[in-house]
Image (tube, rainbow, N blue to C red):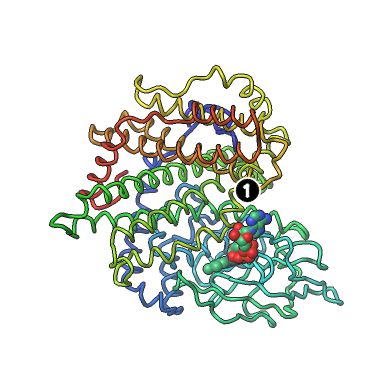
Amino acid sequence: MTNERLAKGGEFLLNEAIGTRLFTPEDFSLEQRQIAETTEAFVNNEIFPDLERMEEQDFPLVVEKMRRCAELGLFLVDAPEAFGGLELDKATSMLVAEKLGPTGSFAITSTGQTGIGTLPLIYYGTAEQKARYLDKLTSGEWIGAYCLTEPDCGSDPLSARTTATLATDGSCYLLNGVKQFITNAAFADLFTVFAKIDGQHFSAFLVERGMAGLSIGAEEKKMGLKGTSTAQVVLENVRVPLENLLGEAGKGHKIAFNVLNVGRLKLSATVTGAAKSAFAEAARYTVERRQFGQFLASFGAIREKLADMLGGLFAAESLLYRIAGLIDDRIATLDRGSESYYEQYQKSIEEYAGECAIAKVFCSNTLAQVADESLQIHGGYGYIKDYPVERYYRDERINRIFEGTNEINRLLIPTLLLRRADSGELDLWDKVAAARQGPCSDAPPETGGELFDTEYDLLANQKKLFLLLLGAVAERRRDQEILLALGDMAIAIFALESSLLRAAKIMAGATERKRLLLQAVVRVTAFTNAAAFQLAANRCAAYGAQGEVLSELQLTIARLGTYPVQGLLEAKQQLAGAAAESGGYLF
Ligand SMILES: Cc1cc2nc3c(=O)[nH]c(=O)nc-3n(C[C@H](O)[C@H](O)[C@H](O)COP(=O)(O)OP(=O)(O)OC[C@H]3O[C@@H](n4cnc5c(N)ncnc54)[C@H](O)[C@@H]3O)c2cc1C
C-alpha cells in the first residue's frame, strides 16, 4: 500500500482528491487479468453461440450455462474462503461482471446469482445457514433469487405487504404474499424473501423452492432481456423454519439496502461491459458501410458520435473501478478473523453508498447513450434483429429502472451526503461556509499552463459551485427537483474527476500515441461533464433562488463553470479515427 490517504465516502465533493489513493484498470494484477480472460473466453465460446436459444427462454440451457459458469469458478469470486470461496476483491468481482455484461440476459441471470441471490446469505447468514446453502449456490447446483419487489411496492420496499406470522405452535413462520418481477424465478431453488413479521417488522427469510405453498407465476413478456426469467413468486402459507430467518428480525432493511449497494456497482460493471461491446459493433460498422462513396467513419456526424461515446465509456470505466478500489482499500483494513468482520465489511461498503448510486446512474446512462447511438450508426440495419445492436438497445432500457430507479439513485446522492454531514462524518457545512465567503475572488479556469491544469481548475470550481449552491438552496432541500439537480452536479464532478485523475496517473507510463489519446479523451469528457454540470447547476439555482441572489448565482455559474476548451474538434476526430481503426474501445 502506498502512503496516500484513503478518501471518505462523499469526500470528493469537499476536498481535492490529489494525494488520495486511486485504483484504475491499469492496476489489474496478472491474476485479475487471467480471470477476465477466462470469463471473456467463456462468453465468446459458450454463451454467444447459444444466445439465440437462450433468448427464446430455453431455461434448461440457461441453467446448464450457469453450471459451466460455476465450474469455471466464477461463482466463487465473492464467496468466503471459509466456505470454499475465493473471497476476491471487489475490483475482480466487477471485472467478471463487466466481461459477462455483453451477454445481456445471461449477465443478469448470473450476477443475479452471485449478487443479490447470494450476497444476503454471505453477509448475513449464520455459519449453519452458510453451511447448508452456500456450497449449493457457488457450485451452481442451486440458483438463487432475490424477492423484494411486490405488485404495489417497488421503489418503496418497506411498504411491503408480504407477512411472516409465527405459527401457533411456534415451530415456523407462515409466509403470505406476492413478489413481483423476480429474476431467475422460473428455475431458482433458493429465494431470499422480504416479509414483515406480524405485518410490522421488515425481515428476510431463506425460502426453498420445495417448501409447500410457494408457486411461480407466468413468465412476463418483456421488451428486452428475453433470456432471463422474470415472474411473480406467490407465497401461500409457506412454512419457513425459524432457523431460516436471515439476519435479525426487524432488520431486513439493512440486508435489502446494503445488498443493493453492491448490486448497483455490479450493475455498473455489467452495463459498462455491454456499452464497450455495443460501441465496438458501431466502430467496426463505420469502416464496413459506405455511403456517398465513402466509409461512414469519414463523416463528421458519425465521428462525433464515436468520440462522445468514448468519452462516456472512459469516464464510466474510470469511476467504476475507482469505487471498487475505495471499497477494497477500506475492506483491506479489517480483521478477517474478527467476529464482527461482516458487520464492518457492510460499513465499508455503506461508506461509499453515494458513490455506488453515482456509478449506477452514470454507467446505465452511458449504456443508454451508447446503445442508442450505436444503433443510429447502423441506420435501418440497426433496427433489424440480425445486427447485435438491436439487442443491446432493447436490453439496455431496464438498467435505468432496476436496482433502484435512476431517479431514486439521483435523490439518494445528496440525501446520503447530507446524512453523513449531519452525523459529523463530513465537515460539509464548514466547507459550504468557506465557499460562500470566497466565490467572487475565484478565477475562472484558464487555458495554457501545465497539462490538465485547465481541467483541474474547472473541477475545483465545480466543487466550489456545488457547495455554494448547496448553501444557497439549503432551506429548500426537501424539494426533489433541487435534490435531483444536486445529484446531477455530484455525478458530473465525480465523472470528470475520475477520468482526470486516471489520465494523469497513467500518462507518464503511456506511449506517445496513448498520451495523445488520453489528452483527447479528457478534453471530451471535461466538455461533456462541464455542460451537464452547468445545466444542473442552473436548474438548482433557478429552483432554489430568486431575484438578485439568482442573478448573482447565474453569473457565478457561467464564470466559474465554463470550460474554456481548445482543440475540441481535433480531439474528437483523433478519438473517432483511432476507434474506427482499432474497431472498439481504446483504453
Ligand atoms: C426485468 C426486471 C427484473 C427485476 N428483477 C427483480 C428482482 O430480481 N427482485 C426484485 O425484488 N425486484 C426486481 N425487479 C423490480 C424492480 O427493482 C422495480 O421495478 C423497481 O425497483 C421500480 O419499482 P416499480 O416498478 O414498482 O416502480 P415504481 O416504484 O412504481 O416507480 C414508478 C416511477 O416513479 C418514480 N418514483 C417512485 N417513487 C419515487 C419517489 N419517492 N420519488 C421520486 N420518484 C419516485 C420512479 O423513479 C419511477 O419512475 C425487476 C424488474 C424488472 C422489470
Please state the horizontal and vertical placement of residue 498, each as a whole percent of the image.
45, 37
Q: Residue furthest left?
A: 293
Residue that appears at 41% across and 69% down: 68
Q: Residue furthest top?
A: 441
441 vs 526, left or right, is: right
Q: Is residue 186 above or below residue 318?
A: below
Location of the C terminus by quadrant is top left
Please state the horizontal and vertical placement of residue 319, each as a whole percent of the image.
46, 42
For numbered disc 1, what is the local secondary structure? helix
Please state the horizontal and vertical placement of residue 430, each as a whole percent of the image.
67, 25
Q: Residues within 10 Å of mark 1 (few under 14, many from 20)?
A: many
In front: 566, or 269? 566
Q: Is mark 1 within 8 Å of ligand 1?
A: yes
Q: Is residue 451 above or below residue 188?
A: above
360 vs 194, left or right, is: left
In front: 166, or 265? 265
200 vs 230, left or right, is: right
Give the residue pinned by disc 1.
411
To which quarter of the image does residue 572 belong?
top left
Residue that appears at 15% across and 54% down: 294
327 vs 478, left or right, is: left
What amino acid type should be assigned to the residue bearing mark 1? Leu
Residue that appears at 40% across and 25% down: 454
In front: 390, or 189? 390
**Residue 4 visible to an observer of this rendering:** no
Q: Is residue 73 above or below residue 490?
A: below
